[in-house]
Image (spheres, coloured by chain):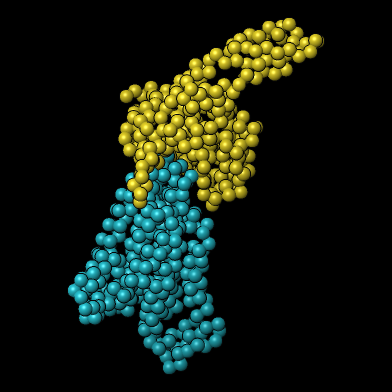
Chain colours: A cyan, B yellow
Amino acid sequence: MTATFALIVDTFREAMARKIFWGLFGLSLLMVLFFLFIMKIDVVEGATATITLFGQQAGPRDGVEIDRMVKQVHSSISTFLYSFGMFLAVFASAGLIPSVLEPGRIEVMLSKPISRAHLLMGRFIGNVLVVSCNIVLLVGGVWLIFGWKTGIWSPGFLVAIPTTIFIFSVLLTVVVLAGVLWESTAVSTMIPVVIMILSPILAQEETARRLLSSEWSRQLWLFLYIALPKVFDVGRMTLDITLGQGAGSWWPIWTSGAFGILVYGTAQWIFEKRDF
Amino acid sequence: MTAELAIETTDLRKVFRNRWSGKEVCAVENISLRVNRGTTFGLLGPNGAGKTTFVKMLLSACIPTAGTARVYGKDTKDPEARRPIGYLPENHRFPTYFTGAGMLDFYAALSGVDSAKRRKLIPELFERVGLDPKWMDVRVGKYSKGMLQRVGLAQALIHSPTLLVLDEPSDGVDPVGRRQIRDVLHALEAQGVTIFLNSHLLQEVELFCRDVAIVNKGRVVLEGAVSDLTAGKGYKLVAMNGSGPKEWNLGSREEANGKIDDLRREGFSIESLVPTTSRLEDVFIEAVQGKK
């Protein structure tokens, strides 16, 4: 337990030493503070009477249903998390795995009475927790502020916390595998980013089935769609839950999870056999 | 398998294979080595002889192609076998975001030392390795090479190991620091800690180690007690009296000591006593060039 805690704390320390993590936290904090101090909402009989920005009335003039406005803000935050936020988190985390494998550093860690699996898992958990803190700060902060200012406590938005952490963890397994294989921050960043970019394209599976002419290309598309993590689908699912439309199928979660387990298992297997 | 041995390797072999070309290089070839508990052991060899690969296999940082490595009777594949080991690598790269104390705290925690003990040990170790405790809260990125070496040694000692594996421990350390490190190691030796030194500084090994093994091209070409391997070599003694300096060539350490005692009684003052050659160096060169 002491060693696991030490590995997690070490990951936090390294993350904080990297300026990009401060950037991530700064961005989240800025958004939270924006909603806390800058935006003032006056609610009259369940509708937004005025929204004030920097002391200036910014509308709406006719009054918008407060419930709808809160959901719109929540869904915007969810969309941000699954696009730009996820990219930033992967970009910020990609160096944390290769750095621990640097010659002169890894040997000292391997000389300690901990297994390689323990070491890798400690680093992985630490990395997930660092990003989780950021997600909790942003989602939790916005949720609390809007609840406090409007009296509307929309629990669906909080689903963004576990689903975002989950999909980040799945992408992080790719970072771990690439890091263990190539010890390169650039490669560890590129592969999950490519997966993120491919995700909304592959999700158009029904359209692709109609447009693709050959059977093998349709099968390849389907295979990639099933096999790769469904960042887009899980994001859409989160958005639906946020908007109170229900989760729909949990299939993107199971298949993405299976992908993560397989990739992490492969990374660990390679790490166990590697020479340093 | 006896626990009288701190380290025991049997036909330890490591072949590196290029992932693309398939070309193989044998770095360590069937090394069988026994290091007694409580001894000071030096592993010598020219660059590329396989010393570091051998050490890494002891620590399980490198997976043996064949053979076994045991520490106090336990296979080094078992993480528990590494609990009694303190290790300082040659080209260490400690994360620069650590403060000196933070770094020691982290590595001690990885070794399972509880937090109360860590808090007590860290300032003690700073002083023990000759570092001013005011550096405890300074980031290691600000440390000089010599200071890094000292804090690295402290890291290796933080969990009170009974086997210390050191790769070039005095690299980058000034002469005073070298002496301090040697004193620390001597104190550990007196406490019964086994010290395994991997160094290219032959004089350092000769001064400090009781036993040595010389490795060349992945094989042990010579091993034994330093005193046995260097037996028969001499010293040059220079002493002065009223009629000026005089020189004596003496065959052994004992003979030199005897002569010094005699000369002191006769009123000579000792000017210098130097080995007529760097004795282990001769043995080393003969061994790696195959002249012996």
Residue A153 visible from this viewpoint:
no
| Quadrant occupied by the N terminus of chain B | top left
The tally of labels here is 0
Identify the residue at horizontal 21%, vertical 81% (top origin): A210
Compared to B247, does A222 lie above or below? below
Compared to B74, does B149 lie above or below? below
Compared to B258, does B29 lie above or below? below
**Residue B265, how many percent across, how many down?**
71, 6
Q: Nearer the viewer, residue A188 or A48?
A: A188
Identify the residue at horizontal 40%, vertical 88% (top origin): A64
Q: Nearer the viewer, residue B213 or B221?
A: B221
Whether residue A262 sits left or right of residue B92 in the image: it is left
Q: Nearer the viewer, residue B29 or A131?
A: B29
Farthest-out residue, bottom: A62
Identify the residue at horizontal 55%, vertical 44% (top origin): B101
Residue B166 visible from this viewpoint:
yes
**Residue A156, how many percent across, how many down?**
32, 73
Farthest-out residue, right: B242
Identify the residue at horizontal 34%, vertical 28% (top origin): B10
**Residue A122, how many percent across, how many down?**
39, 51
Whether residue B124 sits left or right of residue A264 in the image: it is right
**Residue B131, how many percent across, how many down?**
61, 38
Whether residue B146 sits left or right of residue B41 in the image: it is right
